């Protein structure tokens, strides 16, 4: 076999990098410091989003295929995941300037690639820190293509995915840009919640992830050209606590009318609340759990400082209904935001409720 000078130089750099990696490895097994080398595709992917804390040790590891981390890097989590043949990808935020021209993209991608390699991770999960307007989204396909090319060359088997809104809105070119970008990504995560950020008809507390809108949103991406097996349905493990401006009855909590992004009303002022806190608050409610059969979601009412509050959330029942979309649309998988929003304490009731949430993600 003949080697060029450039080829020998590249090999030397690779050997040096591997040597340094092994020396810096903090895992019990040095092999766990290497990213998963093959592009493993599971029949159904389960993305567990980790937003921080130490509860990751108690996740349902037998169900997870990929961990998405944000915030502080935790080497122990990476070691544990790789020991279970599970990928770990890093959440990365994209700004307009990162996609402006070729040089900006090259530098930005190189920076992220270096971080991923230094941390022995398996790829990135991209989110946007600016509104998806056409001047911004038009650059996305090129960025994803260039990122996929460089990551695949440097980290064979690496995974590139990105987040999209709950519906592919064809009223602008943003939808077609997202579809084009999906051709170069491994997965597209449809965030099937925050639907009530834009309220167009009335101004009442409502479900965070209404059943029919979730179905419509998923279908919109597939109809417009995203391959169904690339679509990841992302469900919320959190709810919204609405303060009622006027409380008429349960399910009729009128909220303060505040315009948002063109819509006359929005849930933007409602407080996000993790599932673990919701379960602690529910027993203190004045209504108990109520099920809305139209939105297919639970809610309850409580009172604080003379003000009525209505909490809309998702539980194993509502999530199980939404996981039926995996088979109906032949989706690539499902994910939850966030895995650490459940209660992993030693309390047996809390443990049972958390187990039910994990089981709801895996349809029979």
Image (cartoon, rainbow, N blue to C red):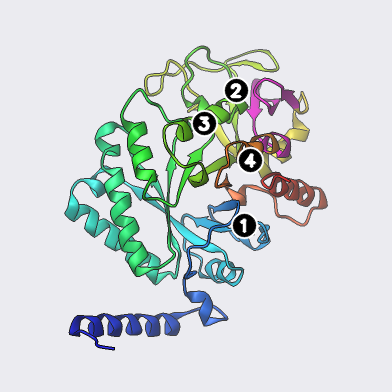
Circle on res. 206: 2
Graded by Cα atoms within 10 Å as few (under 14), some (14 to 19) or many (20 or more), the crowding at tag 1 reads many
> Does any portion of residue 131 appear in the rendered image?
no
Give the answer, above or below, for where 199 lies relative to 175: above
> Which residues are the magenta region?
290-319
Between disc 4 and disc 3, whose residue precedes?
3
Front: mark 4 or 1? 4
Label 4 sits on residue: 327
Between disc 3 and disc 2, whose residue precedes?
2
Graded by Cα atoms within 10 Å as few (under 14), some (14 to 19) or many (20 or more), the crowding at tag 2 reads many
Front: mark 2 or 1? 1
SS of the residue at dot 3? helix
- At a point 76% along the width and 24% down the height, the residue shown is 286
Q: Residue 317: x and y, percent? A: 73, 35
Mark 2 to mark 1 CA distance (whole Å): 30 Å
SS of the residue at dot 1? loop
Circle on res. 64: 1
Circle on res. 231: none
> Does any portion of residue 277 appear in the rendered image?
yes
Between disc 4 and disc 1, whose residue precedes?
1
């Amino acid at each position: 076999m003949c080697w060029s000078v450039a080829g020998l130089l590249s090999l030397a750099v690779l050997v040096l990098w591997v040597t340094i990696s092994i020396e810096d490895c903090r895992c019990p097994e040095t092999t766990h410091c290497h990213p998963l080398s093959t592009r493993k595709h599971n029949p159904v992917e389960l993305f567990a989003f980790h937003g921080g804390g130490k509860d990751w040790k108690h996740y349902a590891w037998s169900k997870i295929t990929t961990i998405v981390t944000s915030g502080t890097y935790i080497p122990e989590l990476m070691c544990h995941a790789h020991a279970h043949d599970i990928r770990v990808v890093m959440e990365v935020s994209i700004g307009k300037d990162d996609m402006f021209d070729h040089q900006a993209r090259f530098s930005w991608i190189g920076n992220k690639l270096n971080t991923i390699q230094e941390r022995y991770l398996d790829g990135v999960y991209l989110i946007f820190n600016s509104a998806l307007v056409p001047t911004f989204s038009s650059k996305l396909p090129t960025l994803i293509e260039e990122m996929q090319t460089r990551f695949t060359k440097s980290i064979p088997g690496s995974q590139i995915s990105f987040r999209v809104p709950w519906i592919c809105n064809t009223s602008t070119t943003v939808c077609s840009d997202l579809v084009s970008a999906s051709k170069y990504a491994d997965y597209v995560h449809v965030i099937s919640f925050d639907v009530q950020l834009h309220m167009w008809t009335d101004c009442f507390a409502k479900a965070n992830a209404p059943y029919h809108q979730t179905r419509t949103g998923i279908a919109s991406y597939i109809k417009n050209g995203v391959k169904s097996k690339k679509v990841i349905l992302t469900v919320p493990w959190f709810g919204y606590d609405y303060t009622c401006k006027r409380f008429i009855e349960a399910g009729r909590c009128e909220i303060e009318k505040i315009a948002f992004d063109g819509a006359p009303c929005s849930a933007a002022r409602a407080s996000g609340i993790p599932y673990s806190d919701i379960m602690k608050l529910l027993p203190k409610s004045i209504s108990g759990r109520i099920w809305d059969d139209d939105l297919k979601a639970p809610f309850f009412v409580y009172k604080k400082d003379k003000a009525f509050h209505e909490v809309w959330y998702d539980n194993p029942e509502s999530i199980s209904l939404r996981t039926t979309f995996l088979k109906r649309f032949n989706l690539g998988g499902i994910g939850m935001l966030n895995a650490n929003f459940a209660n992993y304490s030693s309390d047996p009731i809390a443990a049972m409720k958390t187990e039910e949430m994990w089981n709801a993600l895996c349809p029979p």
